[in-house]
Amino acid sequence: MEKGELELRISLRKLLIALFITVVPLSLLSLYTIARTEQSLRQTTGSNFHTIANALATQVSNYVHDRALQVATLARTPSVIEAVQQGNRSRSALSDAALREQIDRVERSWNTPQVEPLVKEILSAHASRAFQQQIKLDRRFLRITLTDDRGRVIAASHKTLDYYQADEEFWQAVYAQGRGGLNLTDILYDEVTKSNYIGIGVPVVEEETNRFIGVLDVLMDISSIFPAANPPGSNLRRMLIKEDGTIISGPGVTLSMNAKAEEYSLAREALQSAAGRQTGFAQGPLSNEKDTLIGFADTRLHEDYKNLRWLVLVAQDARDAYASIRQVVRFIWFMALMSLAAVTFLAVYFSLHRTLRYEGISQAAQSKAAAQ
């Protein structure tokens, strides 16, 4: 009986030693690895946010480039070029002084009944009818205006606010001192149509000589440029903003609200460092004291169109962003701590059990000695 008990005691010792050799180092290694892995997973989540923002920024950039190309293509159609050439020929017999006097006279009477015959002539021109048809076919076209090389309106889809366009900043940007250049305005909001739009101005050039002969200006609706709604079942916030933080499009926000993106403060701070620009994400508390993770990406439109300095932000409460990670990490922490607790319990149990057996053997030996 004593031999059996001794054998059991030895087996428990071996088991405990084996547990100390395997479970304890593995548990400690797991805890260390978890700490390192959790940081790595946070980096991965932040990088994923940046990837989403970058994909949206590319989508926005491609959309704007496509609209600019669409207007540039329209400017090269035969009807547009012919209308401009005809308009330029109509004033070729006038001196500069006579032309200036004619422009001033029409400009002064542009919003009076006196000029209605000229307006009717302009709006009934072949190019004007083509513009009106273009608007019917593509609702993104809001207004189309064509001027000659002096800035006079020679065709339009609607009556313009002014007859003379050459004193406008956008016209001068397209004219570019006779060289001709593409120009896009910053995004604006039209209260009548409830839409966001940009002005796209392109030069009309003579095919044979590539010489500047006029300007085609289009007000283009770009309300559908950005998916403002959150993905189904997600509280991920996606925003298109200007460089001053004004929200162009976002969940429940429109440009007309002139609202600022609070998340932009985190992005702006990160953009001030090379590391922040490289990682493309940042994390920190907002005014509601909620820790927030944001990914950001530059549309890079300003490289081609100086007025379009836009950023894309993708934001989510950090607690929600790391929810899946937190569950896995907590489970691993629990298992590692339970393993350590089990080994500790066995060690304590074995120590107490051995002490009790030694005390029992001692008392038996004393009783035997007293009996002798």
Image (cartoon, rainbow, N blue to C red):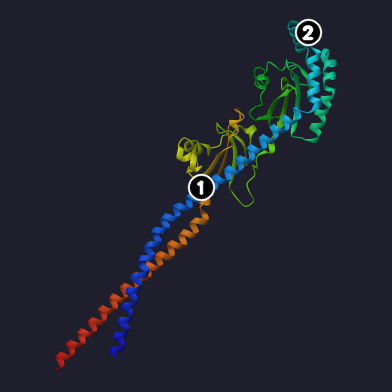
- Write the residue at 42% across / 55% down: 36
Name the secondary structure under disc 1: helix
- The amino acid at mark 1 is Gly
Q: Which residue position holds label 1?
A: 46
- Write the residue at 61% across / 40% down: 58
Q: Is residue 56 above or below residue 108?
A: below
Q: In which quadrant is the N terminus drawn? A: bottom left
User: Which of the two residues, 122 or 127, is positioned nearer the viewer here?
Assistant: 127
- Write the residue at 65% across / 21% down: 173
- The amino acid at mark 2 is Leu
Q: In which quadrant is the C terminus drawn? A: bottom left
Tell me the tag on residue 291: none
Q: Is residue 192 above or below residue 371?
A: above
Q: Which residue position holds label 2?
A: 94
Q: Is residue 135 left or right of residue 311?
A: right
Q: Earlier in the sequence, mark 1 or mark 2?
A: 1
